[in-house]
Amino acid sequence: MPPRSNPSDRRPPQLQSTDAPLEARVVPAFPLAVNDTVSVATDPVTFAVLNNDSFPDQILLNGFTDPPASQGTLVRNADSTFTFTPGEGFNGTSFEYTIGPRKPETLLSASPNDVTANARLGYHVVLSADGNMAFVGAPDAPGGNTGTVNEAGSVFVFVRTPQGWSFRQRLFAAGDGQAALPAPQPGEVANPNQASISNFGATMAISADGTTLIVGDPTATGGISGATPGGGAVYIFTLGSSGFNPTPQKLTPSGLDGVGLGFGESVAISGDGKVLVIGNTTGNGGPDGTVPGVGTVLVYRRTGAEFSVQPSQRLYASDYAGANFVSRFGHSVAVSRDGKMIVVGDPAAPGGIDGTVPGAGAAYIFTDTTGFAFNPTPTKLYANGISTAVGAELFGDTIAISGDNSVIAIGAPDAVGGDTGTIDQAGAVYVFQRIASNSPNNYVYQSSPQRIYASTDVGSGLDFGTTISLNYNGTVLLVGDPTALGGTSSNVPTGGAAYLYRRSSSLFGNEPVQRLTSSDTVTGDAYASSVSLSDDGNTILAGAPGAVIGNKVGAGALYVKEIGTSTGKVTLTRAGAAAVSSRMLVSGFPDGSAQLYTYDAEGKALPGQVFRPFNYNGAVQAVVGDINGDSIPDYVFGIGPGGGSVIRGIDGATGADLFPTFSAFESSFRGGVFIATGDIDNDGKSELVVSPDVGGGGRIQIFTLRDGKMAQVDNFFGIEDTTFRGGARVAIGDINGDNRAEVIVGAGYGGGPRIAVFDGNALMAGSNRPQKLINDFFAFPGTDTNSLRNGVYISAGDLDGDNKADLVFGGGPGGGPRVYVLSGAMLMTNIGEAQANPIANFFVDGNANSRGGVRVAVKDFDGDTDMELVVGSGNGTRTELRVYETNSLANGVEPALRSEVDPIGYSNSPLGVFVG
């Protein structure tokens, strides 16, 4: 958010407009490590780690993590390369290295000729989640419909390149005929030098995927009539192949009753760019939305290329208490990445220590649990229990939500604070943390916040908390104070400063870990009038709208700072082994399609290619595996019930069919199949294991690619009951750590949760009766052994880091969404002990009453060799895909969520979600 006052209140004295350079100052030019993958056979391999990393002036710092000794030895060479010598048991590992900046400071300038004195570049700044795009508002730069209208405002876009930051694009209200000079009054002569009333760029928001930019202009011509001077407008820019579309969609509250002037005073956008939130502090509000001038918030949704011109919902402060109640509801807004939580600030509402202090300020949490509408009755946040919160604080002036929803930070720039924590109106920030026992969908936060102020900083100003930003996981907090003493010696009045705080456990440190200023500050620069953080917390934007550039007073500047160090990861894979675990195919779509998913380093789901392998309507089975051994993941599909037993493979490198489509079982069988892939014989190629679905027996077939065709190499009964017709489910994993993967078989629907494990050394010999590694057992112990007849879903992967696959079980259809994980190593010695000490045992979302079952998978999405646990919702429930952090697996406790996404969009799916 920009500084707390309305843009028109903070305009500096108007001077004659002359050209001035646009500057982006990078301090320092900081490298970003890029993860690498190196293929290793049997000989030592020497490789460089810096070649793919950003910026040419990086340096490899001392120290790196050694891989396990059983995997091999790693040596750092004098030229900053590494040499890895694989051990006899090498089957893939990884290590981390750290890089930092070679130079302490770098200055970067760009001069596109269209910034003038008093342009106020840096009044508002936002950074893309990945830290690679910076958007800088200059609300008094030339702009308007032609880009040349005096002081109408522009937004400047910078991008990070391997050589540093570079100016890329200027955006303005192109195509908006209203965004021109004000028309002369009767009897006046038009003045071509007259300033526009617009403040385009005063507010901004960027979607987490970097494709949707929202620009607010609260003084633009717009409003209810669409032509009201100062009514306000919001502009939506979308990213194309050559940059952002220069002609935006314009939104005004045209035709809406009860919307006042200043539409667009605050804006926010969800991570996927589909939920847009706009604040209007002069609109009608109160409990029923009819109280004039107390504020409203409008929610817009996008289903196609553009947002609907009418809001889907309006939100109000439900605790309005009559004529003596002062309100500026909607002055600030924030929306969660998933678009299911909106936080609205009202810096004039009752709040403070007990929620009743007049004018202290408050914030309101609105949640959407249906996917269609927000609950109109919000949860109120205020400085609950804070002894100094007894006066007007402007609590709610600014709001930030961490990307994972774990932290909400609220600025109160008139709160008691300063270096001693006792200075009136010096400013503070209040931090509310989500209650750990609640899942991300519950949005329940602590009622009493942590108070943060400019502790021990004798140069602190009187606007601490004017602007705030959080990184993705809520461990880094950045606070701006544009009135603090600035400069390298912290002695320049109103030079401005930013304060960086880190959270090591449940609380942020009382003192900032770093105080950030600009090295060339002069009085009035107002550095940190607006700040923004990247998701990883390593890249910082700070705007200085009062900066003097050359001789241009108030031209403004943008500062980009890279802090700390950057860690890269090198994954060492056995030659011929594909990095298939980082990709996942999701199915359950009623049209027979499957969609590819990957995840970024922060756990964000990235939907990819959609496949429709068969002319079939229903849920297909889909898995990823390196069938041809080219180290590129391939995709295999099995048809569902009613379609027979058809199998199709797609070459991941070319998109062509990998082998001729075939049927695994006889033509009379129409029940569909389950499939799994994995390298059973350690030859660098994935085998395909196929089992029948309901209506078939427990027969298992193993195929491998030979001469362009899938050849059957084994055929046996996995469930040794020839009369059973519930089918079977299959998984592949190396349970005993001998580099030969076992085949795990679970009974299908109608059977108990019976599990059989076949020794990888005995498979693929065509014996039709391979040896079992351990005795059969029931996945779920106790009374469930006798009562359950829903079968079981299964997967395998190393979840406890002992280099042996663990077994993951999910309740079958008609059963609860129970996830049960057993140690593979422990199963080898004592099945009962493994069941008495499970790695994990929980019901998804704590719901033991659901009866759709749950599908399971194990993946390594971020390439760090630490596997993630994935679950897909069962039939008859809302479609949902969850990824859990394995470092929080525990018996009886649902682990922490790394990611959650609805891949299909059904509230009651008859098919559920399959993951493979």
Image (spheres, rainbow, N blue to C red):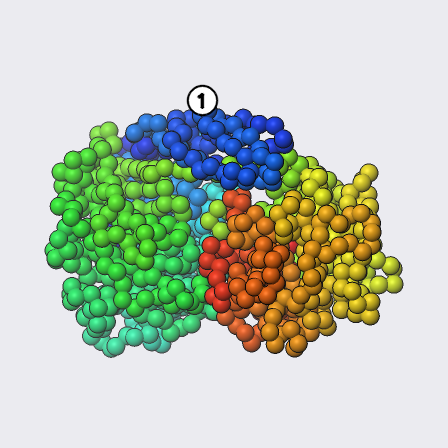
Would you say residue 652 is visible in this rendering? no
| Vertical arrangement, residue 122 with respect to residue 5, above or below | above
Q: Mark 1 packing: few (<14 Cα in 10 Å), some, or many (20+)?
A: few
Q: Position of residue 485 (x, y in %)?
A: 16, 42
Residue 619 horizontal/vertical position (percent): 70, 62
Quadrant of the snapshot with the C terminus: bottom right
905 sits to left or right of 374:
right
In the image, is 689 to the left or to the right of 767? left
The one of 478 and 476 positioned closer to us in this rendering: 476
Type of amino acid at the residue the image marks with label 1: Asp
Q: Is residue 795 visible?
A: yes
The answer to whether residue 186 is above or below residue 149 is below
Extreme residue toward the front, this view: 829
Figure label count: 1
The residue where tag 1 is placed is 79
Horizontal and vertical percent position of residue 388? 16, 63
- Which SS class for mark 1? loop
Question: Relative to 903, is 286 above or below?
Answer: below
Q: Quadrant of residue 122?
A: top left
Q: Nearer the viewer, residue 736 or 847?
A: 736
Residue at left 19%, top 70%? 357
Question: Which of the 4 image quadrants contains residue 563?
Answer: top left
Residue for point 69% across, 67% down:
754
| Of 64 and 61, the residue lying toward us | 64
Residue at 44% of width from left, 38% of height from top?
65
In the rendered image, residue 382, in percent from the top left (x then y), is placed at: 26, 67
| Residue at point 29%, 59% (across, down) | 431
